Image: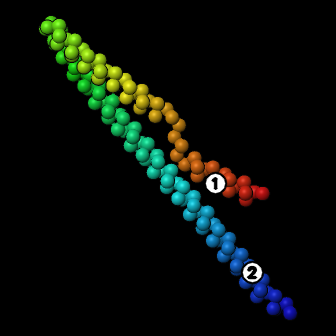
Amino acid sequence: MQNDTEPQERRGLLASLRSLVTTLVAIVSTRLEILISEFELEKLRLARMLVLGMAAVFFAAMALIFLSLLVLMLFWDEHRLAALGGISALYVALTAGTVWWLRRDMLRKSRLFSVSLAELRKDQLELET
């Protein structure tokens, strides 16, 4: 009789191991999908910061060009100075706004892999109980 129960126990053990492996593969698969999506979000954030940085450099260059023209035209007619001063002030304001926006994004803490870490902590707590 002992021989009859051993194959059933082995089958039960194998089924349990298969179930465990299937569950572990599902967990790992889910975690990898979360990691990939977080990586994609971080990549988009960095691309946005690069575009904002380039915009800040462009507006700063435009401001310097028009400020230089303002100095050159300082001794010319009054109407030209007012127009050039207004354009220069516009580019200075655009540069300041873009730099402020870029700085705000850079100071914001990156959330890269935060969801994955939270899920792993949750898994760890479930396994401990």
Q: Secondary structure at mark 2?
A: helix
Note whether residue 71 is visible: no
Badge 2 amino acid? Gly
Residue drawn 64% across the image and 71% down it:
21
Residue 41 placement (x, y as % from top left): 47, 48
Residue 115 relative to residue 47: left or right: right
Residue 61 placement (x, y as % from top left): 26, 26
Residue 13 placement (x, y as % from top left): 74, 79
Which residue sits furthest right? 1
Badge 1 amino acid? Leu
Image label count: 2
Q: Is residue 60 above or below residue 2?
A: above
Residue 32 numbered mark, or none: none
Structure colour scheme = rainbow
Residue drawn 13% across the image and 8% down it:
76
Note whether residue 33 is visible: yes
Image-quadrant location for residue 68: top left
Residue 120 numbered mark, or none: 1
Residue drawn 29% across the image and 17% down it:
89
Q: Label 1 crowding class (10 Å Cα cut-off): few <14, some 14-19, many 20+?
A: some
Q: N-terminal of the two: label 1 or label 2?
A: 2
Residue drawn 86% across the image and 93% down it:
1
Q: What is the quadrant of the C terminus in the image?
A: bottom right
Image-quadrant location for residue 128: bottom right
Residue 35 placement (x, y as % from top left): 53, 54
Residue 48 relative to residue 10: left or right: left
Judging by the rendered image, the residue that carries numbered circle 2 is: 12
Q: Secondary structure at mark 1?
A: helix
Residue 98 relative to residue 7: left or right: left
Rounded to the nearest angstrom, the CA distance separating label 1 from label 2 is 29 Å
Residue 98 relative to residue 76: left or right: right
Q: Label 2 crowding class (10 Å Cα cut-off): few <14, some 14-19, many 20+?
A: few
